[in-house]
């Protein structure tokens, strides 16, 4: 774990650490936590590395790298026995009472612990408390070392030198682990590739950190981080970047947004990568690559920051009407504003994808924190009834392929698709296999190209009643085609009508597309099932809890507790019969969710009439760790847990 005040390079240093580990072939999982102000408040980043597969974060810290007093105060108690703390000895005289951004409960708890151990209230006392618990302590005189680095480059500004403290903390961490320094240098140069001088100064800071640790603490930690014996090509991506890459490869050519955390990062990524190379299967198999041939194997996307979320959804709908694969990304409050536009798209059967990055609500809630509280809202957003498809991804790799499916669903069934992910996934970094572009298939449904030369003066029955409910769709502006779009009920041409018989037929036409989607979407895209069928416990969940559940299952299996896991991915139309069949064989069903009420558990009970036996819920704004989930399931297995177990860990 590395931490510091926002704006001091915490994110940068964590990325350097993750990349340096990934370059050697190690698996990586990292997650970022930060306050909603822009600068000053505390943020921290946890990075796990392993030769084995890892899919989640843990609460216990093995090594804490700090370069400010608040990180030491907040997180020293989380470092395990035999773990390590790297800190600046110049901070030792700082007093706990003078750290203004520490919340009263944190201050009070730590004060009580220090008093109980007969210690004072300085950082030196906090370090001593950790030492007594068996934590290895490694003072690192950052400024002294950085001044020597500065002398080599003619840099005397303390402000500029302090910018390298975070990289030096990373270097010291790796040096204690006796990790190959070249991987760290490569990661630093990649991070600062647009600033060659800064890159080399930071590489020198890495060398200074390594040299100091080798001379003073050589081999004292006793833990060595070694790369695997062989490595396969893999990606290291953040969740919102994964979504951005997928949208471009899916053929999305218009992305709209209004800035909102954590959704904005995706659009900003797309703004920075508006053109990408396209490679993959033959153009004959994939319309997107046929398109790419006309633009020299390059894909491009237009990203528009609108004046508000109402404009964002309506502009994306306009793109869909014009035949362009279009999307908008938002979070809870922004999605609230999009509800009316979503209904207009439903009435006019417009394909549009809404990426919903869940965060904690209601209202502004916790703007930069995690929750899974929008499931029922996504299911019912908008007045009246209209079809929408709701897809929820559970990890980065799933997000990539589900994004492409979302656009295919939208155009094939001519309906809005809401793709739900969340803050935890958006702000997590993970290694994964290289994406298989042969799995990227574009299905544009009943899309017609002009000129069509429609009869009757060009009038075209855009909303023609068909057995499937899906009508041929020429984009607005197609030569030789004339039809109308309106928010009112309408006939096949789009003319407003209040005829009761027509209303019944049009409602049934639109809603029947859900039945069609339910029949045609493969089961493999609706649910995932992990573990033995005859397990003692079935975990039911959705979204980003997937990683923590799978990691916890490995530990539970070692304890002899047989657990399986049903992950629901397609929320609407709901795979009722299959879920009912699986859960009817379960001995004990535990609903695991990041919300107060267990929203998915309620939906499952509504659809299958099968109740949940237990609930594990968390709603403090921090994602579920595999450690706390493991302990919770173990407690339930022993039979001494309440029906509703609330998890509370998180700093």
Image (cartoon, rainbow, N blue to C red):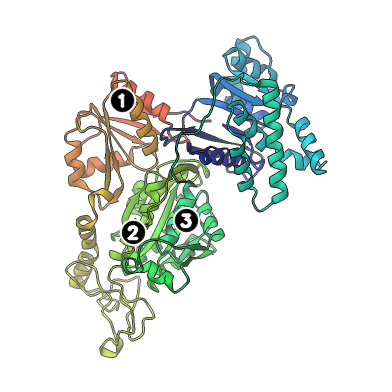
Q: Would you name the residue on which mark 2 appears?
A: 383
Q: What element carries label 1?
A: helix
Query: What residue do we see at 55% from left, 41% from top?
Result: 19
Report the disc number at residue 557: 1
Relative depth, front residue between 35 and 269: 269
Label 3 crowd (10 A; few <14 / some 14-19 / many >=20): many
Q: Which of 650 and 334 is in front in this view?
A: 650
Q: Quadrant of the N terminus?
A: top right
| 557 lies above or below 260 | above
Cβ atoms under marks 3 and 2 closer than 8 Å: no
**Circle 1/circle 2 CB separation < 8 Å:** no
Q: Which residue position is annotated with label 3?
A: 244
Residue 408 left/right relative to 198: left
Where residue 635 appears, as percent x and y from the top left, is 34, 21
Percent coordinates x, y for residue 84 in the rendering: 59, 22
Q: Which of 3 and 194 is in front in this view?
A: 194
Q: How many circles with numbers are drawn on the protein? A: 3
Residue at horizontal 29 percent and vertical 49 percent from the top: 571
Q: Earlier in the sequence, mark 1 or mark 2?
A: 2
- Residue 149: x and y in percent read 77, 37
């Amino acid at each position: 774990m590395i931490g510091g005040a926002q704006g001091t390079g915490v994110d940068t240093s964590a990325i350097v650490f993750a990349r340096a580990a990934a370059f050697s072939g190690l698996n990586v999982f990292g997650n970022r936590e930060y306050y909603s102000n822009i600068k000053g408040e505390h943020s921290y980043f946890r990075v796990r590395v392993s030769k084995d597969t890892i899919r989640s974060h843990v609460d216990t810290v093995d090594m804490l790298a700090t370069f400010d007093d608040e990180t030491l105060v907040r997180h020293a108690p989380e470092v395990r026995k035999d773990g390590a703390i790297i800190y600046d000895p110049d901070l030792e005289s700082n007093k706990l009472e003078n750290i203004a951004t520490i919340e009263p409960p944190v201050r009070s708890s730590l004060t009580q612990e220090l008093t109980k151990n007969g210690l004072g209230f300085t950082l030196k006392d906090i370090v001593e408390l950790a030492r007594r618990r068996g934590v290895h302590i490694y003072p690192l005189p950052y400024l002294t070392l950085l001044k020597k680095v500065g002398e080599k480059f003619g840099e005397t500004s303390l402000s500029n030198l302090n910018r390298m403290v975070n990289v030096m903390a990373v270097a010291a961490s790796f040096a204690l682990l006796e990790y190959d320094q070249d991987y760290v240098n490569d990661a630093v140069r990649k991070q600062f590739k647009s600033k060659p001088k800064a890159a080399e100064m930071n590489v020198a800071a890495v060398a200074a950190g390594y040299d100091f640790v080798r001379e003073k603490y050589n081999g004292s930690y006793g833990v060595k981080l070694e790369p695997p014996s062989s490595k396969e090509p893999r990606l290291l991506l953040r969740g919102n970047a994964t979504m951005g890459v997928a949208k471009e490869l899916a053929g999305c050519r218009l992305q709209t947004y209004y800035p909102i955390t954590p959704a904005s990062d995706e659009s900003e990524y797309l703004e920075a990568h508006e053109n990408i190379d396209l490679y993959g299967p033959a153009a004959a198999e994939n319309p997107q690559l046929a398109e790419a041939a006309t633009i020299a194997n390059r894909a491009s996307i237009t990203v528009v920051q609108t004046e508000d979320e109402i404009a964002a959804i309506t502009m994306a709908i306009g793109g869909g009407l014009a035949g362009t694969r279009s999307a908008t990304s938002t979070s809870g409050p922004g999605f609230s504003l999009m509800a009316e536009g979503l209904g207009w798209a439903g009435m006019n059967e417009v394909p549009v994808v809404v990426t919903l990055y869940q965060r904690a609500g209601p209202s502004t809630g916790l703007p930069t924190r995690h929750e899974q509280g929008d499931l029922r809202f996504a299911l019912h957003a908008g007045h009246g009834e209209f079809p929408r498809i709701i897809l929820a991804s559970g990890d980065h790799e799933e997000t990539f392929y589900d994004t492409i499916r979302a656009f295919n669903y939208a155009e094939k069934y001519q309906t809005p698709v809401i793709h739900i992910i969340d803050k935890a996934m958006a702000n997590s970094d993970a290694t994964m296999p290289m994406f298989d572009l042969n799995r990227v298939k574009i299905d544009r449904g009943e899309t017609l190209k002009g000129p069509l030369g429609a009869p009757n003066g060009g009038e075209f029955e855009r909303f023609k009643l068909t057995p499937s409910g899906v009508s041929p769709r020429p984009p607005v502006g197609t030569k030789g085609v004339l039809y109308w779009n309106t928010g009112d009920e309408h006939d096949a041409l789009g003319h407003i009508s209040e005829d009761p018989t027509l209303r019944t037929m049009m409602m049934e036409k639109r809603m029947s597309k859900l039945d069609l989607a339910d029949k045609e979407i493969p089961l493999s895209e609706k649910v995932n099932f992990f573990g033995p069928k005859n397990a003692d416990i079935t975990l039911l969940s959705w979204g980003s809890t997937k990683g923590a559940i799978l990691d916890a299952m490995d530990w539970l299996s070692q304890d002899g507790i047989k657990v399986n896991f049903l992950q629901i991915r397609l929320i609407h139309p709901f795979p009722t019969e299959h879920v009912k069949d699986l859960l009817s064989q379960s001995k004990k069903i535990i609903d695991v969710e990041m919300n107060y009420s267990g929203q998915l558990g309620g939906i499952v009970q509504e659809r299958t009439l099968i109740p949940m036996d237990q609930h594990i819920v968390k709603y403090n704004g921090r994602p579920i760790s595999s450690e706390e989930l493991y302990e919770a399931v173990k407690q339930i297995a022993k039979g001494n847990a309440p029906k509703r177990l609330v998890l509370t860990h998180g700093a």
